[in-house]
Image (cartoon, rainbow, N blue to C red):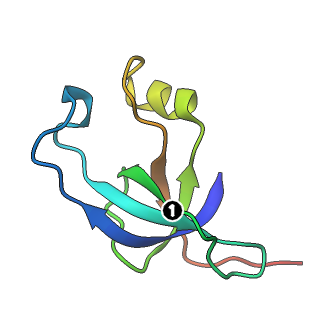
Amino acid sequence: MLLARVTGTVTASVKTPSHAGKKLLVVTPEKEDGSLEDRSYIAVDLVQAGIGDRVLLMREGSSVRDMLGEVKSPIHAAVVGIVDEVQKS
């Protein structure tokens, strides 16, 4: 899992049946120092996150598909939590 920020939303009027009814977000992983990486991903939102939220991002495709019960789906990433706080030692 990764820490990421929601940086946008995706609207797709035509999509594969496994994506029907699912909200899609653009998420950008955070670096160790809290800044954002240079690349973003599209992820299925499972927790009602919004733009600007710091989230937990799962990017292990087979794990995401297993969790959703969509074994043959092209889903590779999912937002699985909204982060309230991170404490570093």
Q: Residues within 10 Å of mark 1 (few under 14, many from 20)?
A: some
Q: Which residue is mark 1?
A: 40
The single residue placed furthest to the front in the displayed view is 38
- Residue shown at the point (65%, 51%) measured from the top left: 1
The answer to whether 81 is drawn above or below residue 14 in the figure is below
Could you say which quadrant of the image residue 26 lies in?
bottom left
The answer to whether 65 is drawn above or below residue 31 in the figure is above
Residue nearest the viewer, comparing 68 with 74: 74
The single residue placed furthest to the right in the displayed view is 89
- Residue shown at the point (76%, 79%) measured from the top left: 87
The answer to whether 42 is drawn above or below residue 15 in the figure is below
In x, y percent, where is residue 55? 52, 66
Could you say which quadrant of the image residue 10 lies in?
bottom left
Seen in the image, is 12 located left or right of residue 36? left
Location of the C terminus by quadrant is bottom right
The single residue placed furthest to the top in the displayed view is 72
Residue nearest the viewer, comparing 88 with 12: 12
The answer to whether 41 is drawn above or below residue 3 in the figure is above
- Residue shown at the point (48%, 44%) measured from the top left: 77
In x, y percent, where is residue 48? 31, 61
In x, y percent, where is residue 83? 55, 71
Residue nearest the viewer, comparing 38 with 11: 38
Indicate the secondary structure of the residue bearing disc 1. loop
Could you say which quadrant of the image residue 33 lies in?
bottom right
> What count of labels does the image hold?
1
Three-letter amino acid code at disc 1? Ser
Residue nearest the viewer, comparing 51 with 82: 51
The single residue placed furthest to the left in the displayed view is 13
Seen in the image, is 26 located left or right of residue 9? right
